[in-house]
Image: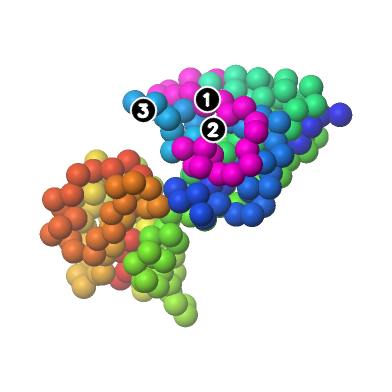
Amino acid sequence: MTAKFYGIGLGPGDPGLVTLRALEVLQSAGRIFCVAARGASRSVSASILAALPGGTAEVTELEFTMSTDWEERLARIDGHAAAILELLRGGVECAFASIGDPMTYSTCSYLLRALRKLEPELAYEIVPGVNSWSALAAKCGEVLCEDEETLRIVPGYSVADGEDPAAFSGHGTTVLLKAYRNRNRLLKTLPPGAQVLYGANIGLAGEVCCSDVGEMESLPEAYLSMLVVKH
């Protein structure tokens, strides 16, 4: 029998926000995988895993490419999926742990798709994680949405110059994820009267929470960052 695969959400960075179910799986898994760091000795995911109690499984950091060539990116994912499947077929329960939620803008979703393509009857469980925008709203005591307001999640790095990132139509909240490189330009597209929160490295060392646009523009850019715009 092929062993079970687990996709685990580790939350935004604070080990205290890892769910009880995620911790239970990580403590019993035979092997744990996560995304390797780029330009650092340890990834955020690996750091969270190291801070959790009771872990005995070997943790392996997998390198993924951010190439603009999707064929190259998918080939790397397929290679990792094949290696994990070999362990699963050998009876080793494997978990892939990622920051945030594993099914929201996550490498885990691509990996799961590749595994299921190779093994259509794959036994798997996805354990959701606390997402970063909820963590930022909680940290700042700000309501994301109420009543009939809408919530939109937009990858800020994909917004082209001169493009309105979310149309900002109607009343609600737009979350612009990974706003590094684009943050100050995105701030110039805000609708009149909009309330803005900027968060970076929520739950991690160097955490930033800011509601002053002028201050935001002077802050250093961070990869794990977002803008929350209420309009």
Q: Secondary structure at mark 2?
A: strand
Residue hosting label 2:
34
Under mark 3, the amino acid is: Ala
| Label 2 crowd (10 A; few <14 / some 14-19 / many >=20) | many
Q: Is 10 or 153 nearer to us in this picture?
A: 10
Task: Please tell me in which quadrant of the rendered image residue 6 appears.
Answer: top right
Q: Label 3: state its secondary structure.
A: loop
The residue tagged 1 is 62
Query: What residue would you read off at disc 3?
Result: 40
The segment highlighted magenta reads 47-75
The reply to whether the C-beta atoms of the residues labelled 2 and 1 are less than 8 Å apart is yes
Q: Secondary structure at mark 1?
A: strand
**Where in the figure is residue 113, as x and y percent of width and height?**
64, 35
Amino acid type, residue under disc 2 in the picture = Cys
User: Which image quarter is the N terminus in?
Assistant: top right
Crowding near the residue tagged with mark 1, few <14, some 14–19, many ≥20 C-alpha atoms within 10 Å: some
Q: Position of residue 185 (x, y in %)?
A: 19, 49
Structure colour scheme: rainbow
Q: Taking 76 as reference, is 84 left or right? A: right
User: What is the x, y in percent for residue 67?
Assistant: 40, 24
